[in-house]
Amino acid sequence: MSTETTPTVVRIGARAIRSFHITQESVTAFGNLVDDHNPIHSDPAAAKAAGFPSPICYGMFAGSLFSGLMAQDLPGPGSIYLSQNLRFTAPVFVGDDLEVIVEVKEFHKDKGLISLANTAQKTDPATGKAIVCITGSSVVMNKTLQFEGESTWTAAK
């Protein structure tokens, strides 16, 4: 019985999406892990005093959700996370459902490098429209992939 898998095919515009429900338990666990106990993440009164309607998720917790998406879905197993930049554009609250998206923007076949656009968004319950909470980009390396098409990536030459 073979355990060999077919390599993931990467092309410009390929996307992967995952949904996450942000619970107080997961926010508290993250805060304990990084030793950040700012009460705006757990105490409704502290969050309100800071100008938020309810406790907010740690920005880096929400931003870290890209890691699992890249490791499991796109580019997939064998990926090495090389860099990440994030811009926090709207708060993520405890109880929010967050959609995390990565999209292939460029690649460098010879080096196995992939540049990804990263977005995390939620749906505004009042309007049904997407609210972008995080934007950014990342670079990963994965030498087990098949690349389809061409990409001009001058930064990696």
Image: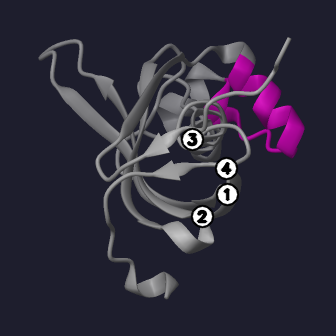
Q: Earlier in the sequence, mark 2 or mark 1?
A: 2
Amino acid type, label 1 = Lys
Residue 124 percent location from the top left of the image: 23, 21
Q: Which residue is mark 1?
A: 143
In space, the residues marked 3 and 4 are separated at their CA atoms by 20 Å
Residue 86 in sight here? no
Q: Which residue is mark 3?
A: 66
Q: Which residue is mark 2?
A: 112
Between 119 and 51, the one nearer to me in the picture: 119
| Residue 51, quarter of picture | top left
SS category of the residue bearing label 4 = loop
Amino acid type, label 4 = Thr
Q: Is residue 126 above or below residue 32?
A: above
Check if residue 28 falls in the magenta segment: yes
Q: Which residue is at a point 15% across and 24% down the rendered structure image?
A: 129
**Is label 3 in contact with label 4 (beta carbons under 8 Å)?**
no
Q: Which residue is mark 4?
A: 144
> Tag on residue 116?
none
Q: Nearer the viewer, mark 3 or mark 2?
A: 2
State the extent of the magenta-drawn residues as a range: 26-42
Q: Is residue 69 above or below residue 125?
A: below
**Is label 4 in contact with label 2 (beta carbons under 8 Å)?**
yes
SS category of the residue bearing label 3 = helix
**Is label 4 in contact with label 1 (beta carbons under 8 Å)?**
yes
In space, the residues marked 3 and 2 are separated at their CA atoms by 19 Å
Check if residue 27 falls in the magenta segment: yes
